[in-house]
Amino acid sequence: MTILDLLTQLEAHPLVDPSIPKASYMPLDLSVDNSELQAVNVSDAEDLERYIWRYMIANKAKIAYGGYLEKRGIYQRSTYFNQTNPETERNIHLGLDLWIEADTPIFAPLAGTIHSFKNNTNHGDYGPTIILKHHSEGGEFYTLYGHLSIASIEDLEVGVEVTQGAQIGTLGMAKVNGDYPPHLHFQIIHDIQDFSGDYPGVSNQLDLAFYKNNCPDPNLLLKLY
Ligand SMILES: [Zn+2]
């Protein structure tokens, strides 16, 4: 079975409060093609947060989501994303983001074990991050949870089992999450390579074919749309 077939077949627990109906999820376009963002300073967490909340209120949404393979301007503020060369500038997002307020509890979509965790403190990085490892008859893969609170990675232990739907953490605020409006970065990783507590969540054009293959669309599992 391919990883894509496997993900499609699995039934995931929602990442956030399961009582929130799918109708309250609203797609959010943070790509360079969204002309509304020209009036927003996307480098400023507060300015971007105001935009996202205005958008959600206008659409009566509880959660805004999106971003898989989205080309974004938001990364230009930090040297961590190599923006000096157009070929190696990392600006293509590899996960799916869920925009919702800080302290929101995050739940494991599938049973697994704690593979690794780390506070990634570069400007624009994930901040506190957890990676789960999942086994099933169809194969092995990993899921990454970025922009969590500091408390989420305290008292964790590698190898500990996590049941499906168990709370694995809460969302962090801009001060700890790499300086973004509060959101969860969720990414599926087939081969984790040698990474621990971290994995690239944004690619450049040169490496995109590899990352696209190794990090399938999270919506195959989440089935939000
Ligand atoms: Zn993200």
Image: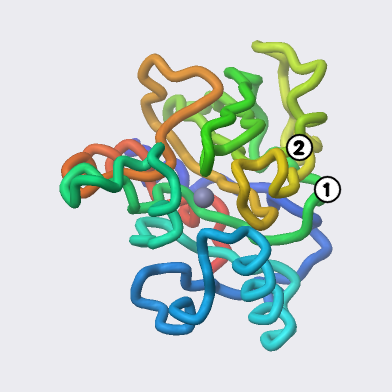
Residue type at numbered disc 1: Asp
Is there CB contact under 8 Å for labels 2 and 1? yes
Indicate the position of residue 172 as horizontal and vertical percent values.
74, 43
Q: In this orientation, which residue lies closer to the viewer: 201 or 174? A: 174
The vertical placement of 104 against 59, above or below, is above
Residue type at numbered disc 2: Ser
In the visual, does 190 lie left or right of 179?
Answer: left
Task: Identify residue for label 2.
Answer: 149
Please, what secondary structure does the residue beneath circle 2 have?
A: loop
The residue that appears at 44% across and 52% down in the rendered structure is 77
Please, what secondary structure does the residue beneath circle 1 have?
A: loop
Indicate the position of residue 131 as horizontal and vertical percent values.
58, 27
Q: In this orientation, which residue lies closer to the viewer: 43 or 132? A: 43
The residue that appears at 62% across and 31% down in the rendered structure is 129
Residue 70 in sight from this viewpoint: yes
Q: Which of marks 2 and 1 is nearer the N terminus?
A: 1
| Quarter of the view holding residue 204 | top left
Task: Identify residue for label 1.
Answer: 103
The residue that appears at 34% across and 61% down in the rendered structure is 71
